[in-house]
Image: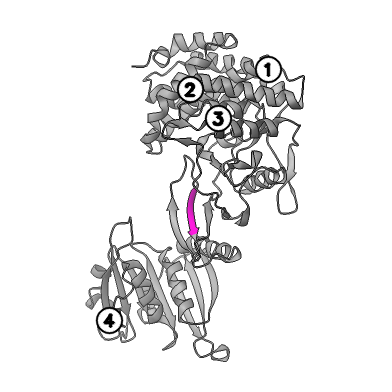
Amino acid sequence: MTAEPSRAPLPTAAWYIDLADETATVSLAADVAALVRPGDLVTLSGDLGAGKTTFARALIRTLTNEPELEVPSPTYTLIQVYESAVADAPRYPIVHADLFRIKEASELAELGWDEAADGALVLVEWPERAGEGLAGDRLDVAFHIDAERGAEFRTAAVTGVGAFAARLAHQKALREILESAGLQGTDRAFMLGDASTRAYERLTKPDGTTAILMISPPRPDGPPIRFGKSYSAIAHLAEDIRPFVAIDLALRDLGFSAPAILAHDAMTGFAVIEDFGPGLVVDADGPIIERYAEAIGALAALHAVPRPAQVPDGVGGDYEIPPYDMEALTIEAELLLDWYAPHIAKANPASGVKSDFSDVWRGLFADIVAAPATWTLRDYHSPNLIWLPDREGIARVGLIDFQDCVMGHPAYDVASLLQDARVTVPGDLELKLLGLYAKLRRAHDPAFDMADFARAYAVLAAQRATKILGIFARLDKRDGKPQYLGHLPRIQAYLKKNLAHPVLAELKLWYETNLPSLLAPAP
């Protein structure tokens, strides 16, 4: 008789928590409420009076959004069923079971266990009475009385088993970073995210002071697409939170208004940062001229002197800012062929035509990558600029998105602002602010060549418009975010304007031949 092969042990993660009183137990329940979802199993163990029912009651009240809900112990009824009422989430049943009176696992079937637990969040006290019937993925919370430290003092050993292991580690890191920033127990409100995978929450303390929780988990490298590298590696996109921290500290050291970092965890991608508030550089009529002028002034100050390619990383080492090199610039432009052309323009250029497109761009980029490089923040436009009226000079422009910073041509960020993808910048304002930028640069360097800068500006503005057409088409097709398509006419208009520059004549011819619909007059 062949022995049955042994199963590999499920991964686990543990979290040990001191609970000084019932309030601390309720706080733990709030943490677990953010962790669980329908279909999950939460097992509660510990001696009589250790706090299992107190915890279950707090968890159920949180999930049902009924702070005064009566939640009796199901010792005699064995099973009690409730319904969740979490905001912006589908309702689901919550099963609270007490198996103290169960003698063996087979009795579960007589209780209609399978039917009750289907699609529900299941909380089980005395789970050991079910034997192997409750094995597998689960969250176990074991309470222990510590009478030597006080009559109410408890300790809790929270263990995530199987799929719960990673989720528990994530929640543990979140609680620890909030505690390290002095923000435990704050109200948390989801904020509108951006076009990336990052998410944000506003944290509000009882006294009304606020901070921002940035959730930027490390993202796995994508499949190799060229030279054995992924797209993000070729384009030099940040894959964890370390570049954000390094550039933030470097900007603040120079007097720019990047948010103060109150706490961060590089492993999970959590950061608690300063809340700059609601100040915008645009209003219902478009750019606020004086605020855009200050933003141009901040760029001129950033570009006035050479910047190092290596900066402190905030943890005792150095961070090397990657170059905005030929391959990065080219692969970004090619997003138009990958996403905009087939899905928006309904065109699919042949391989030879695609090769011609890339070759034209490479010729244009030759002088760009050979020029002296500076910090290129890469998304220097209205959604990422916060007006701070209580500060002075360049510090009045708050900067919040720079983790993809590269060493590149200074014209790129100027084009990002003056051909803003989210708001139309009138042509006369664009020219006026370009003139202001040139004046400020010449004040530091009388040899500043505006003609050379203007050529680079036309090339990089066209590259950025080309890239964003591809990105916004991708956000619609791949990520289910069609709202970005509303910006396409503006970006197309920017591209057509840039293609009028003589340096882009060959590129304009490519568009006229292969994507004429993009250059057609707007309806």
Q: Which residue is mark 4?
A: 78
Q: Nearer the viewer, mark 4 or mark 1?
A: 1
User: Looking at the picture, does residue 355 appear above or below residue 272?
Assistant: above
Dot 4 amino acid type: Leu
Residue contact between numbered discs 2 and 3, judged by CB atoms under 8 Å: no
Q: Which residue is mark 3?
A: 417
Dot 3 amino acid type: Leu
User: Looking at the picture, does residue 326 appear above or below residue 84?
Assistant: above
* Residues drawn in magenta: 199-203
Q: Which residue is mark 1?
A: 450
Question: For this view, does 64 lie left or right of residue 380?
Answer: left
User: Looking at the picture, does residue 367 appear above or below residue 256?
Assistant: above
Q: Residue at x 60, y 34 (%)?
A: 294
Q: CA distance from mark 4 to mark 1?
A: 80 Å
Which secondary structure lies at badge 3?
Answer: helix
Which secondary structure lies at badge 2?
Answer: loop
Viewer-side residue, 148 vs 331: 148
